[in-house]
Image (tube, rainbow, N blue to C red):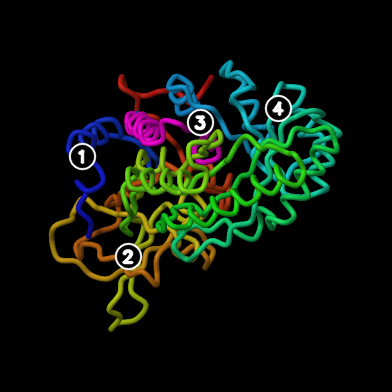
Amino acid sequence: MFNRKDFVSDTEWKRFLDFSKGFETPNIVVNLRTIKKNFIQLKDSFPYAHIYYAVKSNPGIPVLRLLDSLGSNFDIASRYELDKVLSLNISPDRISYGNTIKKAKDIKYFYEKGVRMFATDSKEDLKTIAKNAPGSRVFVRILVENSPTADWPLSRKFGCHPDMAYDLLVLARDLGLTPYGISFHVGSQQRDIGQWNDAIAKTKYLFESLEDEEGIRLSMINMGGGFPAHYIQPTNELKEYASEITRYLQDDFGEEIPMIILEPGRSLVGDSGILTSEIVLISRKNNTALERWVYIDAGKFNGLIETIDESIKYPVITEKDGGKEGLTIIAGPTCDSMDIIYETEKYKLPIDLKPGDQIYWLSTGAYTSTYASVAFNGFPPLKTYYMGEDGLEEDTV
């Protein structure tokens, strides 16, 4: 159905096959070489930006070590991620607490560990930061109504209206905090570059009005993530995102562009992963059904959660590609009717597939192993392997 070479080169495919030979399925192999290449490309595309890797997208120790060596900073969602990052002797001044939903004791914990930059989008959270992390820098996340062009929207739950953001930054000053900047997120796997234009324009309005009316001079714009990995729906290349977004910033801020933070996750690690699954069963629902049901040993509860509503459409290949194909419905192994991966989007798979054959899910390096359940139906967590330059890298400190 898909041309593997559009996603993985012959050289990297051979490395993967040699590396993963004998691994029990389901499993994911993460190619650290791909992550390094993607980080360098992002840095070259946005030379003026500070990169804060979204640890939630893949918190593997080998990934964190690699990005640390490349000079990345880190966007942290919980105290558990913080402990993992600090265990690698990464300085807390390279860490941002980017979650707007947090307990008072966790804010205090971050502060005691040396973190001094916090995200917020509500009055109560801001007051809690002021009490438990006095004097810290805060940035306010504004609400962005993602268009359908984001495959994984992040609107509604996070952010506040720009008018409220204005009030929060004034309150931050009055509470003894440092009003530092504005953040936004245009939605994960955002295919419409113009979404950044709208968000930057709102940010410019806040920068100007706060300085003119309150004497508050903000220093930073956190543009979040949103840059794409390579799935089956086409996207522009990163250089086009960088060119347009840089133009938007220059149009609004001229030569005085503030400090820019990016929080990439999917775009750095998504393309690095290959999930290998095994066919458990192939069946039809009636004697004249045109579609086969292909059940595999991975599903929504152990690795492929982002196929909810068929939002993320992964490229899929098999060992038998190249022959006659037929429409399929692909489903996972659990006793839950929600565990159907693709039903509306009919994937074509080889007619001669049999139980025991392997199906490879490409571009699965982000939001897979850490989304997997611990033991739903008794299935263990998805096993993840990290392929470095010299072979297997252990996921331990």
**Where's residue 21, x and y in %?**
28, 34
Given contact means CB atoms under 8 Å apart, are the residues at marks 2 and 3 in contact?
no
State the SS at label 1.
loop
Q: Please give the residue where the numbered disc 3 appears in the rendered image.
A: 50
Helix, strand or loop at label 4? It is loop
Left or right of 217 on screen, residue 317: left
Outermost bottom residue: 288
Of tags 2 and 3, the one toward the viewer is 3
Q: Which residue is mark 2?
A: 282
**Residue type, mark 3 in image:** His
* Residue on which disc 4 sits: 116
Is residue 234 a member of the stretch shown in magenta?
no
Q: Nearer the viewer, residue 65 or 120?
A: 120
Q: Position of residue 149 (x, y in %)?
A: 44, 62
Q: What are the residue bounds of the magenta stretch?
A: 33-59
Which is closer to the viewer, label 2 or label 4?
A: 4
State whether residue 354 is above or below residue 101: below
Q: Disc 3 to disc 4, how far (Cα)?
A: 16 Å
Q: Quadrant of residue 91?
A: top right
